[in-house]
Image (cartoon, rainbow, N blue to C red):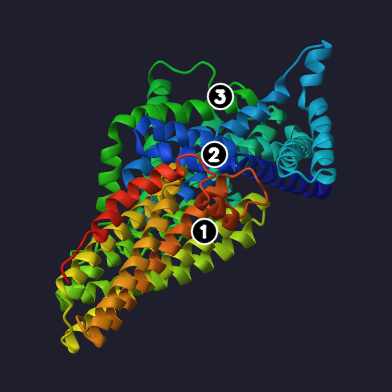
Amino acid sequence: MNIFSVISLAGGIALFLYGMSIMGSGLEKLAGGQMEGILKKLTSTTLMAVISGAVLTGLIQSSAATTVIVIGLVNSGIMQLSQAIGVIMGANIGTTVTGQIIRMSDLSGDSLVMQLLKPTTIAPIVAFIGAILYVFFKAPKKRNIGQIMLGFGILFTGMFTMENAVAPLRESELFLSMFAKLQNPLLGILAGALVTIAIQSSSASVGILQALSTTGVVTWGSAIPIILGQNIGTCSTPLMAAIGASKGAKRAAMVHLYFNVIGTIAFMGILYGIKMTIGIPFWNEVMNRGDIANFHTLFNVVTTLLFLPFTKVLAKLAMLTIPDSETEQQDSEMPILDERLFNSPAVAIQQAHSAVEKMASHARANYAVAIPLLFSHDLEIITQVNAREEIIDKLEYYIANYLVKVSDHDPSEDNSHVVSELFAMITEFERIGDYSINVVERSGEIFDKEIVFSASAKEELMVLDAAIKEILELASDSFRRGDIRLAERIEPLEETIDTMCEILHHRHIERLKSGKCAIESGVVFLEIITNLERIADHCSNIAARLIGSESEDEEFDAHELRRRLHDGHVEGYNDLLASYELKYISPIREEIVI
């Protein structure tokens, strides 16, 4: 093997890695809209988590990448360690898909069908079709399919290049001697781990071993320790990703390491125990690409089945390795927006969505105590309100910056639309928080100036407060669930609140004119009414955006929707409006003693 063969080998490895990377990227983009659904299912059972981890890794062609995503989700608090363990196990199974694809090179037969199915024939055809789809079509779905096909073709081109480059090694005494030494299990495991760490992919490392198997010198005895070492080496990427992350994320990375290390030790113990007692007849026989792929799959499936009943033991081991400090707070009020997820934009967007949900929750919690504070100036509760408002302001800044970075990593049209909608939701919930603070601040003014509201004013405020609490609940729940039916209930309630505010505004002006209400209390009361009305307006904006996001009309107009609703042209709207008027307007229209 001369210098030109080494250069050819390096080029083949480069093409192989690049082909695997763009094929995985294309698959991920194609499945991007479904990844959120897959991840939601992880909350059910460990078995479902294993299946989801295997499916996700099969799509993106990298167990290390899946584990990094899991670490990001654990770090952000979206996923618990117990859920992450199942996904990590499944990721080890999913990563064997690449090897099974490569084994197609071993297809044999003289028939036309078998000749067409051989990678040497089909790979160039697939790559050519992929290039046409990717270069000449603008539709994102077609371009993603083209990228997958291109990656497939480039991957096999790299494999063929590697095979041709290593072909002279079958005559090399040095190479034969080196592989003989790798029959030492410790050296084989070390070699497999180091190569995988160097190229950051066990799938690629296994692919290189499959290419070397064409020389005819790779035996079962030398390949098995290498394959096991490759599974340990793939743990390096998640371990590096966990640096600087939360303790939960670090524990997830440690679970990945323990799973592969303990699995390797157990497998080696069983195999070498059998070899030393009854013997393994095929130990010194040549291993082909299919054998390598099958053993890689067998190891990960068997190890997963063995560990499945002991996930709690793995979690306990990780927690013992990375214990909590006595003073550490377990639940942070500020969700962590993890940049490790940028390589999976659909997951990163879901993380941002969860952070906006947190923002909405804080805004709603602040409003819940705003009206009661007008009548009981509780400094402890006011301190809590101010702390939540500070978190809302920080979240607005952090989520906005995070979404900008997500857009930079994936400027696709679908993701850009979702990001734009989240930007708008941030503004709506932040403004709701601001108006709630405005009401709370009136509490201090009422306390300092010893302002007293009349009994009728208090009763009116309590009815309006109930309506605002309901519309806030509808807005936050419809956003969290993506529930359009809930969103459709908001506009009739908002119109009802507008009517209520008009009635209360007029009634209070009459009290001021008649001298039954002091000027200072009257001004404060009207300010409170105005702030509550604006909270309802922002809830209406949230509803319109949610309804618009589900509309098939590309030129959806929220103002036109409101006009049609208010004109009674939308089925069910008038019925909802009537029910809300009965619930909230009727009580304040009744004669109240002033």
Whether residue 550 appears in this view of the structure is: yes
Of mark 2 and mark 1, the one earlier in the sequence is: 2
Q: Mark 2 points at which residue?
A: 34
Number of marks present in the image shown:
3
Q: Distance between the residues labelled 2 and 1?
A: 19 Å
Residue 590: x %, y % from top left: 22, 59
Residue 56: x %, y % from top left: 52, 38
Q: Is residue 169 left or right of residue 421?
A: right
Of residue 180 and residue 485, the one placed in the foreground of this image is 485
Query: Which mark is drawn over residue 533?
Result: none
Give the number of the mark in front: 3 or 2: 2
Among the 4 quarters of the image, the one containing residue 218: top right
Query: Which mark is drawn over residue 422?
Result: 1
Tell me if label 3 and label 2 are in contact, CB under 8 Å. Answer: no
Look at the numbered disc 3 and give the secondary structure of its residue.
helix
Tell me if label 1 and label 3 are in contact, CB under 8 Å. Answer: no
Give the number of the mark in front: 2 or 1: 1
At label 2, the amino acid type is Gln
Of mark 3 and mark 2, the one earlier in the sequence is: 2
Among the 4 quarters of the image, the one containing residue 205: top right
Q: Name the residue under label 3.
A: 294
Q: Residue at x 83, y 30 (%)?
A: 125
